[in-house]
Image: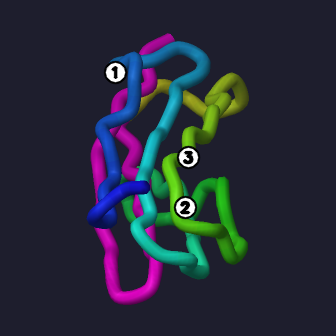
Amino acid sequence: MPKAFSLSQNYPNPFNPSAIISYQLPTNSFVTLKLYDVLGKEVETLVNERQSAGSYSVRFNGVNLPSGVYFYRLEAGSYHDTKKFLLLK
């Protein structure tokens, strides 16, 4: 069981067209994982649900997005973290 909230850097990075985003929850939490473009516009919601404590991985497919810098943000309870990733086509 994870001892702390954490959001890992996606792999691979840069990616084309898909990437894996992993995170850990030490307690049951309502989780949102969203993807934003470099201008801060929400591109996609990957997770939006209550989840049990544990380790999770989400596959993101960017096949319909242009190359560029994107950000993904995890919010779970009072925890939040944002990471940058690069889509290269």
Residue 34's disc is 2
Question: Percent from the top left, x then y, of residue 52?
Answer: 62, 68
Sequence-first disc among 3 and 2: 2
Q: Is residue 74 magenta?
A: yes
Q: How many labels does the image show?
A: 3
Q: In which quarter of the image is residue 80?
A: bottom left
Secondary structure of the residue carrying numbered label 2: strand
Sequence-first disc among 1 and 2: 1
**Location of mark 3 (residue):** 56
- Residue occupying the point 39% across, 23% down: 11
- Between the C-alphas of marks 1 and 2, the distance is 17 Å
Give left or right: position of 35 versus 49.
left
- Residue occupying the point 69% across, 23% down: 63
Secondary structure of the residue carrying numbered label 1: loop
Q: Nearer the viewer, mark 3 or mark 2?
A: 3
Q: In this view, does 78 lie above or below 26?
A: below
Q: Residues within 10 Å of mark 2 (few under 14, many from 20)?
A: some
Q: Is residue 85 magenta?
A: yes
- Between the C-alphas of marks 3 and 1, the distance is 18 Å
Q: Residues within 10 Å of mark 1 (few under 14, many from 20)?
A: some
Magenta span: 69-89
Question: Percent from the top left, x then y, of residue 66?
Answer: 56, 29
Question: Percent from the top left, x then y, of residue 23?
Answer: 43, 50
- Between the C-alphas of marks 3 and 2, the distance is 15 Å
**Location of mark 1 (residue):** 13
